[in-house]
Image: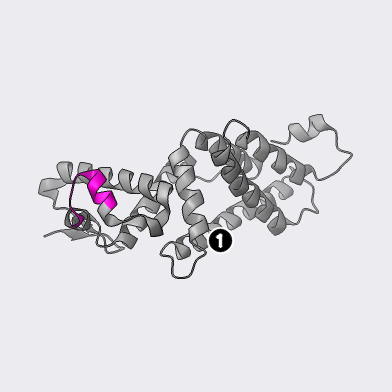
Amino acid sequence: MSESTPNGERQPRAGKSLKAQQRRQEILRIAMDTFAARGYNNASLQEIADRAGVTQAGVLHYFRSKAQLLTSVLDLRDATDIEQLGPDRPRGLAFLRHLVDTVRRNTEREGIVRLYAVLSAESVTEGHPAQDYFRDRYTGLRTFVTDALAEACELGETRPDLDLEDAANAIIAVMDGLQIQWLLAPDSVDMAASTERAINALLGGLADKPDQQRSEAL
């Protein structure tokens, strides 16, 4: 028999763990590439199975449905981000520096950036299986950024009259918008530099603030 995870996903028996885990990870990587290139709706289990060298039943041995395969791909993406963040969230401006560092690292993992861009756009359509995931993700990210901005205000790291929620929404919008531009023209868009400039502008927020002071905010 197979074991189940809390979200209901079937896992292979311990006796087959090494080979099964390798095959499962291979299917996940192929699914990630396929969803990133074609979107969830246009990608098929048959295509993923063919690329993995298994049958559809073979894919469904590890993932009970296409929707669960998508959820597992998104979980894999999140695991990478959580690993990079570490056990404790940075506070104040340190968290905003972390966001810029994340954007910089994203330039080295185009597949994950494309996956996020494609699926987040698709998720606004009715009945999309990733809709709750992205809604929760944006809610959580807004909370993280708002809290970091509040901490920065308390520490005197930014101006006290900053509208925290509006600033958080703007930072997230800049990051996501730059991903689209970068995917379409990677040689013309410096995501990290543009993100840092936008955050510095929001934190300084004053037209008469010297450029040197603004650049040193992060």
How many numbered discs?
1
User: Between 99 and 22, which is closer to the camera in this rendering?
Assistant: 22
**Quadrant assignment for the N terminus:** bottom left
Is 116 included in the stretch rendered in magenta? no
Visible residue check, residue 87: no
Left or right: where 193 falls relative to 214: left
Q: Quadrant of residue 196?
A: top right
Residue found farthest to the right: 208
Residue picked out by circle 1: 139
- Residue 134: percent from left, percent from top: 49, 59
In the rendered image of this protein, does residue 64 appear above or below residue 157?
below
Name the residue type under label 1.
Thr
Q: Which region shows up in magenta?
A: 47-56
Left or right: where 4 falls relative to 113: left
- Residue 67: percent from left, percent from top: 34, 62
User: Between 179 and 142, which is closer to the camera in this rendering?
Assistant: 179
User: Between 55 and 75, which is closer to the camera in this rendering?
Assistant: 55
In the rendered image of this protein, does residue 117 appear above or below residue 217?
below
Magenta span dominant secondary structure: helix
- Residue 86: percent from left, percent from top: 46, 41
Badge 1: residue crowd in 10 Å (few <14, some 14–19, many ≥20): few
